[in-house]
Image (cartoon, grey):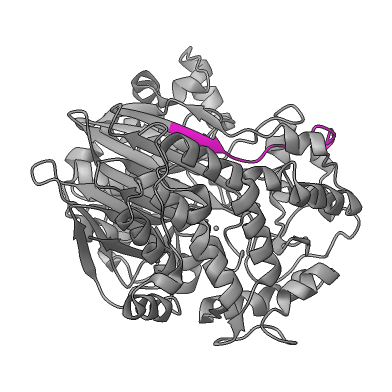
Amino acid sequence: MGTVTAFAADLSPAKWPPDEKALAERLELSAFPPKAAMVEGRSGLVTATLSPIAVRAGIESLKQGGTAADAASTIALTQVITALGSYVSYAGILQLVYYDSQTHKLYSLDAGWNSYLAETAPKTIPASHMLPLGGAQSTAGEEGRKTLVPGFMAGIEAIEKRFGRLPFASLLQPAIWYAENGLAVSPLLGNYFASREKYLSRTPQGRKFLHQAGDHVPKVGDRFIQTDLAQTLRSVAKDGAGYMYTGDWGRQFVDAVRQEGGQATLEDMRRYQPAWDEPRSTEFVGHSVFAPAGSNEGGRQILGALNLIEEMKLDRAEPYFKDWKAFRDLSTLLQFVEYGPDAPPAVAEFQRQHGLHFSQEDRVTKAYARAMAPLLARDAPRHSDAIVVVDRWGNVAALVHSINAVTWGTTGMVVGGIPIGDPAGFQQWRLAAIQPGERVPNDMAPVIVMRGGKPVLAVATVGSSLVAETARILLSTLGNHLGLQAAMEAPPLLYNYLPPKGGGTAILRTQFVPESAYDPDFLRNLEASGVVLERKSRVEVLTIKGTAVVGAGDLETGAWRSVETPSLFGFAGAY
């Protein structure tokens, strides 16, 4: 909508209808919706992962005249509070794809990590422990090296300056209210605290954070009050995002990182800027699919997967969960695109033999898909939070944000009530591939789908298997023409994050499948075709699956729909 005059708004939960507030807080205690439901709205729709309270805050933003940008920002800011900074963070990162109904254009915002100018030996950064349970040994004296310059708050402010309608400070009201008044610890968060106590207890600031519900490890039902964080957010509301970069918080962050052996400087904080760009796009079964641009890797993977799906004619096959051949080919091409920018030996040799030469940008082209599809043919045996918002003007926001670490990270560092994660501790290879001080590529890939110049679908996905989840939803809804409920409830496709084993290759790895999701004949046919399978339990699936929230628009009626289901971490609201 461009720059507009700010409208007065009071989004404080103290002003919400008491029954709606009580319902949101009750639902917050469970990670899953209580029943399957289709949610539909003509004036506004919001859907987001894990937090009914944040969804309620987003609806309030829309009702008080906010745009999709205002509501998405409000939801993101509130999600961090309701997650207690565990899997999303004000010191995290953000990626947005946005459709502006006034200009009829799409925009991409990258508010990812920046590396430190003085960190010149990233390969020597201590490794983080990326599993949610268990533990790695602390690397005292070097924990600061695992940190990076955060982009979340600068990204939120950039979104608001370009597309917002409400005052920036009002968007923080729900987060500040719950920081000051507290939240009941859910069973999910209680498990997080129990498993990560040793990391949070490593520093005095971490122990203070841990004991905000009393002199014990927080347990289910305890009220967790974040007084220091409320003060930080009030300062951000007053001074803007700059408070976290060139203000007191930024200076405290630099001091904390340097005390722990990191290379942060005030110059690193001062020079941080979110990056706007035109999204990348491809055509897929008569639709235009738009994904993040710039250094974003997840967008390249999703667009590349869609091109291969069309080239291999999977949009004309039965859905992957009904046709074992479609499952085989879809899982193979997803393993191929998820390998990212570094071509494995088999791919490099294939390209050499066929005289093929491709740049990184070529990976999202139809020509690349046509050239590489024969390599994938197998006819013979052989964390974060997501948000989608549509407003009354037809603006659409698809936003993903993350702490980019396992819950709270391993540093034990806390600045102004904000736990500091350890994202550099598992991205040494990415940091070594860029110049010090540059933007770190990220995998977050929200997408918006257009048909006839109008938005018809928005998908935002989080989790280890986010590329697979996004691709399967786009194939299921646009290519296989499944209803939204059926597509969302279909078995997830799981990313195998482990190195190849037992004769496997980078693009023919063991395929993880949820146990009991497919009948025995389906699995026998897959194995007979050369696919090596490994069954995963429900608990294992929850740790590695992608979780998507989706908004689907009807061009004839103008209504937008989303789905809630007890098998997914997503909640929705509309009016």
| Res 374 visible | no
Percent across and percent down for residue 458 are: 31, 45
Magenta stretch mostly in which secondary structure? loop
| Residue 138 belongs to magenta span | no
Seen from the viewer's position, the closer of residues 534 and 574 is 574
Percent across and percent down for residue 326 are: 27, 46
The residue drawn where x is 79% and y is 51% is 253
Q: Is residue 190 above or below residue 389?
A: below
Q: Quadrant of the C terminus?
A: bottom left
Q: Is residue 209 above or below residue 255?
A: below
The residue drawn where x is 72% and y is 46% is 424
Which residues are the magenta region? 108-121
Q: Number of numbered discs present?
A: 0
Q: Quadrant of the N terminus?
A: top left
The residue drawn where x is 48% and y is 55% is 170
Q: Is residue 418 left or right of residue 348?
A: right
Percent across and percent down for residue 504 are: 53, 46
Seen from the viewer's position, the closer of residues 546 and 373 is 546
Q: Is residue 310 above or below residue 39?
A: above
Seen from the viewer's position, the closer of residues 249 and 419 is 249
| Res 30 visible | yes
Q: Is residue 320 left or right of residue 78?
A: left
Q: Is residue 248 left or right of residue 430?
A: right
Q: Quadrant of residue 282?
A: top left
| Residue 111 belongs to magenta span | yes
